[in-house]
Image (cartoon, rainbow, N blue to C red):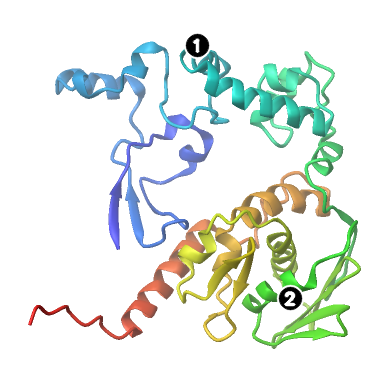
Amino acid sequence: GALNIVGQRAYESLERARSTRIWRNKWVPLVISASPIQYWSQLSIWLYIFREKLLDNVNPLYFKGFDRIGCFMCPASRLAEFEEVKKTHPKLWSKWENFLYKWAKKIGAPKEWVTLGLWRWLGPAAPKKVLSKKTTFNAYEWYDSYSKWVDLKPKDYREDKTTFKLRFNKKLSLKAISSIAIILSKSVKSLNDDKVEVTTNTVKYVFKREGEVEVVAYEPQEKLVEEFLDSVKIVYRAHYCVDCGSCVTLCPANAISIVDRKPVVSKDKCLNCRACNDICPISEVMVEKLIAALIFKKYDAWRRKTKRSRYETAQLLAELMKKVKLSSPPIPSSSNE
């Protein structure tokens, strides 16, 4: 493990405002992060710098109009900061702006989606609603906009007390799905090349080539929706993996590899902890923020009481990594003899 001292502050973004002063990040679960200045104001920071005579160590960009230094296209930034980026790094901003215009065309958004920074919000956030009144872009009609972001779309969704069923607009790659479905259970069966069945003591998952996912519980469960979404995440990980390596790096059992841009899970090594389903950007961002909203027709569907929290995932990974490390045989020391 390690202790990471960071300089983030609660006033920098809503996400950081929700953070505590000490936390464990699920992306680096063995590292405990701490921010001593979490609740400091910007004025307090500068007074400290002047008192301690640290001006020579300050990033020069702060004296050119920037409030924050880091990701130049950060959605938490203000439009004024983007104007500064245009002045100081025109080529860098031009590349990003060209991409935004291409994406605006894809989702049918007007040019103001770019010029007014509406791209900074996915859902119909309050600032987005206010700014969009000056344009032809309707921030309230989020569903049609969301559906244009992906090619593999949820088409028909049904549920009852023990069953969740979802149909997609395209066929599914069962080969890619079966390579990841092992994280649900080691009992994975391919049936006649038409479907893949995964069974546990409480749930059965069925992935059909024709484009259907079905999750059936043997009896009603409070968190069956999470079992269902775990299966949906597997579908999208199988089809949209970007080879970032998060699952490979953070798997406590070293059970995952990437082959031809597809995750492949070792049946012998997998602990069925499902942590990789939480730390994958496709799962955590694409499915949680976009696909779940389309399925449940609720733009903030990711705010579920049953959803595993980041802290829970980080704690689970930290505990598993420690156990695996303790159970591993010691590495023999090198000798010059």
Give percent across and percent down for residue 122: 70, 36
Q: Is residue 126 visible?
A: no
x 55%, y 75%: residue: 273
Separation of disc 2 and disc 1 at Cα? Answer: 56 Å
x 45%, y 72%: residue: 252
- CB within 8 Å, label 2 to label 1: no
Disc 1 target residue = 87
Q: Nearer the viewer, residue 130 or 314?
A: 314
Query: Which quadrant of the structure image shows residue 275?
Result: bottom right
Residue type indicated by callout 2:
Gln
Q: Residue furthest front?
A: 337
Give percent across and percent down for residue 45: 28, 24
Give percent across and percent down for residue 312: 50, 64
Disc 2 target residue = 221
**Relative height, residue 139 to residue 212 (above, below):** above
x 32%, y 41%: residue: 6
296 displayed left or right of 318: right
